Image (tube, coloured by chain):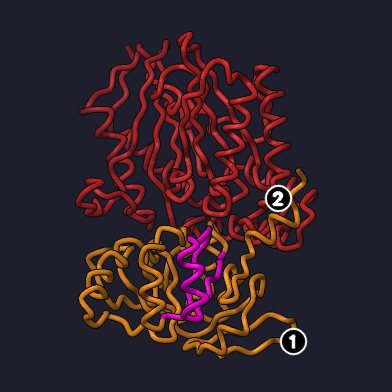
Amino acid sequence: MREIHTSAIADAVKKLCMEANYALEPDMLRAFDRALATERSAAGRQVLEILKDNAQLAVTKRIPYCQDTGFVVCFVELGQDVHVTGGLLVDAINEGVRQGYTEGYLRASIVRSPFDRVNTGDNTPAVIHVDVVGGPALKIQIMAKGGGCENRSKYKMLTPAEGTEGVKAWILECIKTAGPDACPPLIAGVGVGGTFEQAARLSKKALFRELGSPNPDPTLDALEREVLDRANRLGIGPQGYGGDTTVFGIHLLAYPCHITSLPVAVTIECHAHRHKEVVL
Amino acid sequence: MITVGADGIKAVVPPLSDADVESLTAGDRVRISGVLYTARDAAHGRLLPLMEAGQPLPIDVRGQIIYYTGPSPARPGHVVGSIGPTTGGRMDKFTPRLLSLGLKGTIGKGHRSEVVKEALREHKGVYFGAIGGAGAVLSRFVKQLEVVAYEDLGTEAIRRLVVEDFPAIVINDCWGGDLYADGMKEYARE
């Protein structure tokens, strides 16, 4: 049994929160350059150039890329040969969020209750998903999830008869209705199958795949490419000012499902796609 | 006051008159200088009952521009942290009443409702878009910042900003023009 102390977990989460908000991952920066090569709209190209400048400024000045520094969504893979010592795993993660957001000059965007709406002041708590896996390692993936795009995420229970074409149409519908509100260029995380909550969870998890990388399943990869191409024909463009770059990527995860069901959840993610991970 | 620069970009300096607003059309690029007030969901929620009761607001909105934003905290020695726009549509419920009180402009990102677009026509108002997610770049145009109301709301407090050449684009003008609709029509390929 390998022991990992909660202080090491908190420290790791703190660093992930700060770095995610200052430094976009290279896959995002490459997506800006790829889009600049194909975008026909002058206004769209200008937006993409400004976003590149924004990324550069954020990382050099250590100022958040976006003022909405997000809801921390945390996926943990806890090896079953790991023993967390010094307290609770969840408390350690929230402590890391607290430290990262207060010491990193990141915005506190979480209210303690959806009803009384009093800000918690330190961006806690995180949304935490834990999977127990084999081995002696602890993997922590965090996403600083923006609210504007999250508000455009949607779920639909399709029928098996609606099939693959129904899934494609629903993803496109979600992208179209997200439009300028969600800060395009967007990324769509798609969870298909499982149950109501499993599809939603997969739609978030799917966003951690490297942008521009193929789906390991060739059939799903073809589906993603087709939907991406069709989405970029909608004309919404960067920031919705019109153009060819509405979506940077479609990332789909599938799971077995019931004979009656075809659940499809679409998490809408903006160009401020801030994600980092660490293995302890 | 609005003047047109040599590069075709319009310089916008509040307070704005009806004639100023009438000179703007969807797609116009602008540089805003002078005072902006920040307000978003929670601050609007506090302004509404005051407006309903006919009571004075903590800021005089006549001729002014409200920027929908909740900035991130400033590092020591800085004016502000990251400060990009939030989604304007969430303020749709409040905007017509503010326009009726003389507010001339709002800055955000994303669609506004038909009711707001109609109120822009009726009261001579304009909706500007700033680049969502470009909060680090946009912070460079903010020269002064002061909390003027609802400090307990933290990032959602009403702040008085002084900006210089803050870049924006006209999304909805007072003539029914809509950049989002025009842009999509121009580039749609199916």
What colour do you see for chain A?
A: red
Quadrant for residue A220, please give it: top right
Horizontally, is B59 left or right of A226 in the view? left
Give chain B's shade.
orange
Numbered tag placed on residue A63 in the rendering: none
Q: Which residue is mark 1?
A: B6
Point out residue A192 in the picture as x, y percentages from the top left corner.
52, 22
Q: Dot 1: few (<14), some (14–19), or many (≥20) neighbours within 10 Å? A: few
Q: What residue do we see at 47% from left, 16% from top?
A: A261
- Which residue type does callout 2 highlight? Gly
Q: Amino acid at mark 1?
A: Ala
Give the CA distance from mark 1 to mark 2: 30 Å
- Disc 2 secondary structure class: loop
The quadrant of the rendering that contains the C terminus of chain B is top right
Which residue is situated farthest in the top direction here?
Answer: A259
Q: Give the chain of mark 2.
A: A
Q: Are marks 1 and 2 on the same chain?
A: no
Q: Quadrant of the N terminus of chain B?
A: bottom right
The residue at 74%/49% (across/down) is: B188
Residue under circle 2?
A235
On whether residue B108 falls in the magenta region, the answer is yes
Q: Nearer the viewer, mark 1 or mark 2?
A: 2
Q: Are marks 1 and 2 in contact (CB under 8 Å)?
A: no
Identity of the residue drawn at 80% across and 50% down: A37
Report the magenta residues as a range.
B103-130
Question: Does residue B116 show up magenta in the picture?
Answer: yes
